[in-house]
Image (cartoon, grey):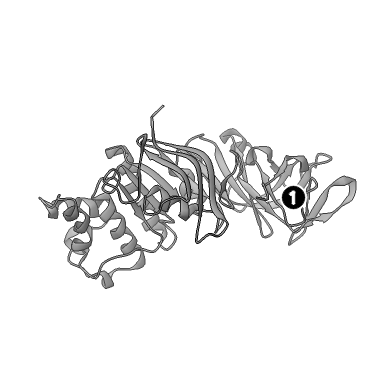
Amino acid sequence: MKPPLYTIRSLVHAYDGGPPVLAIERLSVAAGSILGLVGPNGSGKSTLLKLLAFVEKPTRGEIRFKDRPAAPFSDAVRFQVTLLTQEPYLMRRSVHANVAYGLKLRGRSRDCRRQVAAALSLVGLAAERFADRKWYQLSGGEAQRVSLAARLALQPEALLLDEPTASVDAASAELIKAAVIRARDQWGTTLVIASHDRQWLYEICDDSLHLFRGRILESGADNLLFGPWQPGPAGFWHKPLAGGGVLRVPPPPDDQAVGVLDARAVSLTARGAASPPGLNTLDGVVSRLVLEKNTRRIVATISVGLLALTVKLDPERVQALHLYPGKAVRIHFAPQAVAWCDPA
């Protein structure tokens, strides 16, 4: 196992004396790994990336880099860690000047034109076409790729990406994926990536963390189930779903509690199959199938009205059910499989 590049202990972070927005007791990120961060807006993903980039200092706790204490903007991390924010920031200069800027700061401007061309090539931009363009002559996807090229040119030890595909087209998303994988394979760069695009993450990440309300959820927290919940028969609570169907869950701590459902606790059958007694049974449609890189299992997203549920299946099961996007299927899981998030 590779040694950790990052080690977090007893971390708590809050803004302006407010309640904690992030609370992580312990976390290690292996050197040379690709770690995905998933979770709804406000879950703490961007805050965690800023702390890992050492542009902010945690309110309490410690972040160690290569097993050494590190402070924001210190020499130990200043030229080894770089963050790509969701909104690409480019200086009012040419593409070449933007990509070369970090190299010059680090005293690595020798053969700068070649280094810039190589970085642009990594993100699918030809230097002969783009190097002399001004920042305002770029599309949103091109601007994001130029911003990424500026960071790849530095060959950092850690590259942190916040929603790198949020505002780009599918072709740009694929080029960004290829570029970050190459950074890991070619230079051993460690990547931590926050994204709502789970398919994109599943295809490249060695592991993923699910954040909710500033905390890391247990492994397997693939589905979040939101209230409001109502008391129902047999001691269960329930929630009617748009388009038909009812979710049944164990008694929640309150009617707005958030449930967690492990994708491995969900089974899938053909539409019309017999419903085992005592289980939640919901009819839905396959909206997406993707291979999970680290397990080689197929991650299926099933749309049940406005609810999207994730199911993890062996490839053999996918073949047996003849699954494809658009196919009608039936979901089953026990109400007792739903756990409740810590209200804190």
Residue 67: x and y in percent read 37, 34
Query: Along the line of sight, which residue is nearer the eye, 249 or 108?
Result: 108
Disc 1 target residue:
282
Q: Secondary structure at mark 1?
A: strand
Q: How many marks?
A: 1
Q: Judge whether 338 appears above or below 296 on screen.
A: below
Give, as a three-letter code, the residue at label 1. Leu
**Residue 144 appears left or right of 7:** left
To which quarter of the image does residue 142 belong?
Answer: bottom left
Instruction: Please give left or right for residue 284 compared with residue 206 in the image.
Output: right
Where residue 125 appears, x then y in whole percent? 25, 58
Residue at 40 percent across and 54 percent down: it is 56
Most foreground residue, 59 or 177: 59
Q: Quadrant of residue 240?
A: bottom right
Which quadrant, please, contains the N terminus? top left
Q: Callout 1: 10 Å neighbours few (<14), some, many (20+)?
A: many
Q: Nearer the viewer, residue 229 or 131?
A: 229
Q: What residue is shown at x 71% (from left), y 43% (from top)? A: 339
Residue 7: image location, x then y, percent: 43, 37
